[in-house]
Amino acid sequence: MARTKGSLHDIGDAELLEQLAAAKEEAFNLRFQHVTGSLENTARLGAVRKQVARINTELREREIAAAEALSSQEEN
């Protein structure tokens, strides 16, 4: 099930990367099932796509925060 932004914020980078890989694999499998006509819950495609976007957003926010922290340390 999709996690909320708050719960994604609480987990580590390694677990986020694992979840991202799992979600991408699930999205691939769902697209394959959709094409072959065996997918019953087509709404799951959108939910998984949003989950991937949420995880990518959290990873990018962390990357930006780390870069800002590094640049502020260099200024001092």
Image: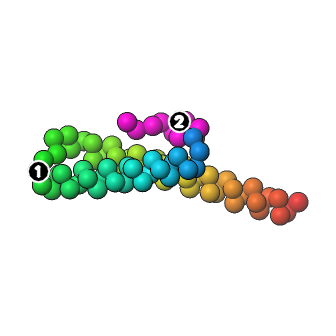
In magenta segment, residue 60 = no
> Mark 2 belongs to which amino acid?
Ser
Query: Which residue was labeled with disc 2?
Result: 7
Q: Is residue 57 visible?
A: no
- What range is drawn magenta here? 1-10
Q: Which of marks 1 and 2 is nearer the N terminus?
A: 2
Of all residues, the one furthest to the left in this rendering is 37
Residue 61, numbered label? none
Task: Name the secondary structure under disc 1.
Answer: loop
**Could you say where residue 41 lies in the image, as x and y percent from the top left?**
20, 40
Q: Is 34 left or right of 48, judged from the image as shown?
A: left
In magenta segment, residue 4 = yes
> Mark 1 belongs to which amino acid?
Gly
Instruction: Please tell me which residue is depicted at 47% across the width and 36% down the height of the picture.
Output: 4
Task: Name the secondary structure under disc 2.
Answer: helix
Residue 37, numbered label? 1
Q: Give the spatial CA distance, label 1 vs label 2.
A: 34 Å
Neighbourhood count class around disc 1 (C-alpha, 10 Å): few under 14, some 14–19, many 20 upward: few
* Pick the front one: 68 or 13: 13
Q: Is 76 left or right of 29, judged from the image as shown?
A: right
**Could you say where residue 1 lies in the image, as x and y percent from the top left?**
37, 36
**Could you say where residue 46 lies in the image, as x and y percent from the top left?**
30, 46
Instruction: Please tell me which residue is depicted at 77% across the width and 62% down the height of the picture.
Output: 71
- Which quadrant would the C terminus be assigned to in this image? bottom right
**Could you say where residue 8 lies in the image, as x and y percent from the top left?**
53, 40
Neighbourhood count class around disc 2 (C-alpha, 10 Å): few under 14, some 14–19, many 20 upward: few
Q: In which quarter of the image is residue 66?
A: bottom right
Instruction: Please tell me which residue is depicted at 39% across the width and 50% down the height of the picture.
Output: 22
